[in-house]
Structures are given as C-alpha cells and as structure tokens.
Amino acid sequence: MIPPRWRRIASERIRILFRLAREESAKHPERSKRYVELALVIAKKYKVRLPKKLKRSYCHECHAFWRIGTNVTVRLNARERVVSYVCKECGKERRYPYGQEV
C-alpha cells in the first residue's frame, strides 16, 4: 500500500530537519536541538515512524543531536551485548542490543 501524500511529505521534511541538525550540531548545538524537536513534532503529528538510524542519532531526554566524541560517549558491553550511548549534556544513558540473530 502506498502511503498518503501528506505522510510522504512529512517523512521528507523529517529527513531534511535531521540533515540540518547534523550540519549545525558542531557550530550551533541549540539550533540543532530545535531541528530535532521540530522533526519529532512532525513525526508525532502525522504518525510517521522514524527509521532506526534517526532514532539512534539523538538524545531522547534533551533532544541533542549526537556527535560521537563531542557530546556523546559510546561504549560496547560485550558481556551484556549492548552498545551504550551516554549523553554528555544531560547524562542520560541509552542501551541498544547488538549481534542478535533476527
């Protein structure tokens, strides 16, 4: 089934906002944060799911766009088989599993 036109437009706008957030995150982190917030509002309003790549590119607590080494620490926990992202702005930790067979 083909998604409605408005949903395709919303998805395109979300991708544009995340691209702008990535570009602005080094020089203007507050502007980058605002782009992420706007993308999330659009996704919620039009019921558009974010792809996994976009979901894992920002802090779900403070909406900061993550730049590895700058505002996020990434660690691998081999025992629990998870990747741990710790936001340096708010201290929130997100854990994602890896290496599982689907």
Image: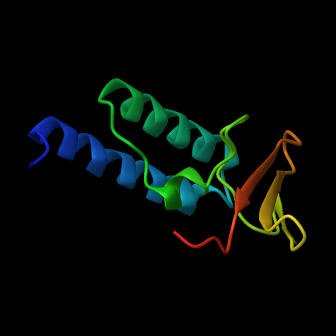
Q: Is residue 2 left or right of residue 11?
A: left
Look at the image and name its color scheme. Answer: rainbow
Residue for point 21% across, 39% down? 7
Task: Determine whether 5 is above or below 24 in the image.
Answer: above
Relative to the observer, which residue lies in front, 55 or 81? Answer: 81
Identify the image quadrant of residue 37.
top right
The correct choice, above or below, for 90 with respect to 82 in the image is above
- Disc tally is 0
Residue nearer the viewer, 68 or 47: 47
Is residue 3 rendered to the left or right of residue 58?
left
Left or right: 91 as drawn, with respect to 33: right
Judging depth in this view, the residue of 41 and 21 nearest the camera is: 41
The structure residue drawn at horizontal position 27% and vertical position 40%, both measured from the top left corner, is 10
Farthest top residue in view: 45
**Furthest residue in direction front, as rendered:** 101
In the rendered image, residue 89, in percent from the top left (x then y), is placed at 84, 44
Instruction: Report the residue at 37% width, 32% height from top.
Output: 42
In the rendered image, the vertical position of residue 81 relative to residue 40, given as above or below: below
Q: Is residue 49 visible?
A: yes
Q: Position of residue 79 (x, y in %)?
A: 90, 70
> Is residue 71 among the parts visible in the rendering?
no
* Place of residue 73 in the rendered image (x, y in percent of width and height, measured from the top left): 85, 62
Q: Position of residue 18 (x, y in %)?
A: 47, 53
